[in-house]
Image (tube, grey):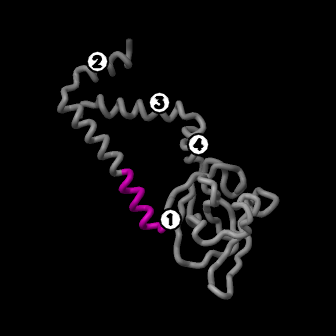
C-alpha cells in the first residue's frame, strides 16, 4: 500500500492527546502567519503589503508571476511611480505606472492617471464608469521591491484549485501525522 497505508496507520495509532497537540500546532502556525501579515500591514501602511502581478501589462519591467512589495507613505504620489490600486466595482488590484498627476488647487488633493507600460492607452477604460482619475483612497501602495517569478505559486493555485486543495490536504496530513 506504500506511503498512503503508512499515513493511514499513523493516523489510526494517534492518541487523542497527540491529535489535540497537532491541531494546536497547526492553529499556532496559521495564527503566526496572520500576525506577521497584520504586522506588515502596520509597518508598510498598505492594506496589502505584498501583491502578485497577474498580467503582462507591466512588461518588460514586471512579468506575470512577480511578487511586489508595497509601501504607502504620506509623500505625494508622482508621475513615474508604480502603484497598485483598486477600482470601484473590481476586487482584483491593478499594478500600473502613474503617467499624470493633477493637484486640485482648492483642496490640495492629488488625482492620478495610470497606464500599464505594455499597454497602448491610459487606464481610463479600466476605471469605474465616468471616472477619469484615481484618488488617493484608490491606491493601495507604491512598489518598493520585487521578487521575480515567485508569485507563480499563487497564480497556479488560483487557476487550478485542485492543486491548492491537494497541497493543503498534504500539509495538514503531514502536520497531523508527525510524531514530534
Residue 155: numbered disc: 4
Report the magenta residues as a range.
Answer: 33-46
Residue 9: numbered disc: 2
Instruction: Please report contact status of discs 3 and 1: CB closer than 8 Å, yes or no.
Output: no
Q: CA distance from mark 3 to mark 4?
A: 15 Å
Q: CA distance from mark 2 to mark 3?
A: 20 Å
User: Residue at coordinates 33% horizontally, 50% vertically from top-left?
Assistant: 31
For label 4, the crowd category at 10 Å Cα-Cα, with few meaning under 14, some 14 to 19 and many 20 or more, is some
SS for callout 4: helix
Residue 144 visible in this rendered orientation of the protein: no
Dot 3 or dot 1: first in sequence order is: 1
Q: CA distance from mark 3 to mark 1?
A: 31 Å
Coordinates of residue 150 in the picture (x, y in percent): 55, 47
Placement of the C terminus among the 4 image quadrants: top left
**Can you identify the residue that label 3 sits on?**
166
Dot 2 or dot 3: first in sequence order is: 2
| Residue 23 sits in quarter | top left
Viewer-nearest of discs 1 and 2? 1
Q: Based on the picture, tell me whether residue 35 belongs to the magenta stretch.
A: yes
Coordinates of residue 60 in the picture (x, y in percent): 72, 55
User: Residue at coordinates 78% horizontally, 57% vertically from top-left?
Assistant: 119
Name of the residue lying farthest toward the top: 1
Which of the pair 156/59 is nearer the observer? 156
User: Residue at coordinates 66% horizontally, 87% vertically from top-left?
Assistant: 106
Name of the residue lying farthest toward the front: 130
Q: Main secondary structure of the magenta part?
A: helix
Q: CA distance from mark 1 to mark 2?
A: 46 Å
Residue 46: numbered disc: 1
Coordinates of residue 161 in the picture (x, y in percent): 54, 34
Amino acid at each position: 500500500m506504500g506511503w498512503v497505508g503508512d499515513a493511514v496507520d499513523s493516523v489510526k495509532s494517534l492518541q487523542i492527546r497527540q491529535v489535540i497537540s497537532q491541531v494546536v500546532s497547526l492553529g499556532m502556525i496559521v495564527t503566526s502567519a496572520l500576525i506577521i501579515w497584520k504586522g506588515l500591514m502596520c509597518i508598510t501602511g498598505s492594506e496589502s503589503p505584498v501583491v502578485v502581478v497577474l498580467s503582462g501589462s507591466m512588461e518588460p519591467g514586471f512579468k506575470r508571476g512577480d511578487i511586489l512589495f508595497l509601501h504607502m507613505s504620506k509623500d505625494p504620489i508622482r508621475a513615474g511611480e508604480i502603484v497598485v490600486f483598486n477600482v470601484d466595482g473590481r476586487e482584483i488590484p491593478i499594478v500600473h505606472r502613474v503617467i499624470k498627476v493633477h493637484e486640485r488647487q482648492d483642496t490640495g488633493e492629488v488625482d492620478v492617471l495610470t497606464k500599464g507600460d505594455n499597454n497602448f492607452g491610459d487606464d481610463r477604460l479600466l476605471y469605474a464608469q465616468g471616472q477619469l482619475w484615481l484618488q488617493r483612497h484608490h491606491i493601495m501602495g507604491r512598489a518598493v521591491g520585487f521578487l521575480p517569478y515567485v508569485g507563480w505559486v499563487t497564480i497556479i493555485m488560483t487557476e487550478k484549485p485542485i492543486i491548492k486543495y491537494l497541497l493543503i490536504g498534504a500539509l495538514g496530513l503531514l502536520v497531523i501525522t508527525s510524531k514530534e
